[in-house]
Amino acid sequence: MGGLLASEIFRLRKRLMPYVLLGLLLAIVGLLYLLLWLVVQVEAEEGTGASELEAVISLSNVLGDGMDLAYSVAGVMAIIPAATLVSSEYAWGTIRTLLPRSAGRDAFMGAKAIVTIGFTLAVAITGFVGALIASWIVSTMGDFSRDLPSDFAAEAVLAILRTTLAMLPYATFAFMIALLSRSTAAGIGVGLAMYFLDDTITLLLGTAGDTGETLSEFLIDANVSALMAANHVEPPGDHFSAWRGAAVLVFYSAAFLAVSIWRFRTRDVHVN
Amino acid sequence: MPNDAPAAHGNARVVLETEGLTRHFGHIVAVDRLDLRVHAGEVHGFLGPNGSGKSTTAGMVLGLIEPTAGQVRIFGQELHGASRELRRNIGAIVEAPAFYPYLSGRDNLKALAMAWGGVSEGRIDELLEQVGLTERAGSAFKTYSMGMKQRLGIASTLLTDPALVILDEPTNGLDPAGQREVRELIPRLAAEGRGVLLASHLLYEVQQVCDRVTIIQRGKVLESGTVTGLLERGSFIEVAVDDLTTATNILEALSFVESVTRENGRLAVAAPADSGAAINRALAEQGIFASTIVPHMNTLEDVFLDVTEHEDGDTQRTAEAS
Ligand SMILES: Nc1ncnc2c1ncn2[C@@H]1O[C@H](COP(=O)(O)OP(=O)(O)OP(=O)(O)O)[C@@H](O)[C@H]1O
Ligand SMILES: [Mg+2]
């Protein structure tokens, strides 16, 4: 599989899309911080006192609120390449060129799965860097709290890993849909729909009695919330443990990848 | 059997063998109990009308398409469970050459070499040179002309130095010089000991470069044999004489004559192409003097059209025409 993986990374690096997506992520995170900073300025002029928003965008909250903010955009950047990774091979027909002389079907999908996980990590790191720079700038401009804990580096690594894991079920879901449908549009479309509608569904289920609430706790969104809450110094809301959230998210991601690999084992690759 | 392989091929290693290979797509039987054998050192033409199952067969040989029934053996091994080394020993383009559009020609070959492994340093440049792409090797694949894409396809086929090469319409879109280059390249591949399976609709090309051909229609083998054998079979010697009846009787008595028929006041004698002199002598000995003795050789196109039209293959042809 090493060869296939090297080839995947080589091809991704030569593609424009990943750079555009990561650049876009940086820009959007920066823009969001800028907008919130403007709101804080308006509030200050009106003399409503130190706002909650100030805390949100301050450097000292970059791992908590900052990563939440980055996550809200970053998922999109993880979903798109995950879907195209598989379906582009079908669209270009390159799958029939690449596959026969390669290490085999499991290795082929395995390499793509690893790249999907790797790129999701890259998205989380970029989101963190964006939030760090933007929050430092606005905090300096607005003289907000810039205190960072002494173990900031270790906490940052953890926050990045948590954010990666939070995006991974959506990315692998898009990956699976793209494989099953052999369509980039379907992979991205269904993947994004899931990403954006999941919290609404979770919310609705939560109001539908005990069964609904129990059910909602097994949806991706509730577990993302539980996991991401651990990035905060004072976790917002009441969540079940981050460990449980992490376990459920790992389970989902592994299941989506397993279904993809299993389906691809026996599927014809048409030549026409 | 007149179509037996010449001795040179008879002993050569079988690089590809299919046995009862079958593939259904719903109601369509794309490939129907196909037996095919390609030897090392031979160019094997794989002919058939559009939709006759050539590409589907290639897809099954490459492990892309699962057969409904039957077997594929590569280098004597069952394809299922064949080692990676064996699978890497097949180079193929099926249908149009497919590459990453945003990568250059050279990077495409690089990406494939990485994925496949075992490609020696310098092999890529050597192949680019061989197919005449060196100058444009740095341009993105999507900017290539059809012929350049085809050339890159041929280069990728040879990347792993395979012992079995499968080419599907390799000269499609090539300019006359390019077509000739490929026509000259193919026998060279075979001379190096590779087996080549060449699917093509250009029958004069096939006739020039192939040692053997298999003609299929609707997934079934109609004919298989050496090119010379196939060409000879339908050929005849045209004889013009005054007394047709006597001449017919004389010729029918000859051992090497298969049949004699009348056509437009002349005789069509089914006999080996080189038997003109013998025919002349036999007639002269009986006092009959022929004004014309002309051998008529079939072309592969004649044989192909004859064979495929006989086999009530009208569905396919009508479908194509409409
Ligand atoms: N994925 C598929 N689904 C349904 N039918 C298919 C599929 N692939 C091929 N077929 C059918 O199988 C038959 C054989 O097709 P194939 O492409 O193998 O023919 P071919 O000999 O390569 O034709 P051509 O000379 O036009 O390239 C055709 O009737 C085709 O419609
Ligand atoms: Mg075809």
Image: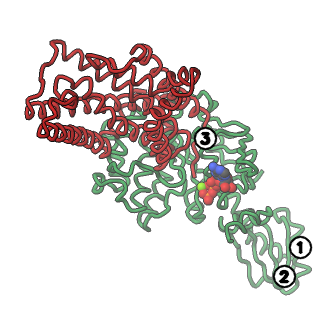
Spatial CA distance of label 2 from label 1 is: 10 Å
| Dot 3 beta carbon under 8 Å from ligand 1 | yes
Spatial CA distance of label 3 from label 1 is: 61 Å
Please state which of residues A255 and B194 is positioned toward the viewer in this rendering. A255
Please, what is the three-letter code of the amino acid marked with disc 3?
Asp
Q: Is residue A102 visible?
A: no
x, y (%) of residue B282? 82, 72
Q: Identify the residue shown where x is 47% and y is 46%.
A: A184
Chain B: colour as depicted: green
| Dot 1 beta carbon under 8 Å from ligand 1 | no
Please state which of residues B139 and A45 is positioned toward the viewer in this rendering. A45
Residue B141, picture quadrant: bottom left
Residue A209, picture quadrant: top right
Please, what is the three-letter code of the amino acid marked with disc 2?
Ile
* Crowding at mark 2 (Cα within 10 Å: few <14, some 14-19, many 20+): some
x, y (%) of residue B285? 84, 76
Q: Which residue is mark 1?
A: B250
Question: Helix or strand or loop: what does disc 1 sit on?
Answer: helix
Q: Which residue is mark 3?
A: A268
Question: Helix or strand or loop: what does disc 3 sit on?
Answer: loop
Q: Are marks 2 and 1 on the same chain?
A: yes
User: Dividing the image into four equal quarters, which quarter contains ligand 1?
Assistant: bottom right
Q: Is residue B123 left or right of residue B294?
A: left
Q: Which residue is mark 2?
A: B288
Question: Helix or strand or loop: what does disc 2 sit on?
Answer: loop
Chain A: colour as depicted: red
Q: Which label lies toward us, 3 or 1?
A: 3
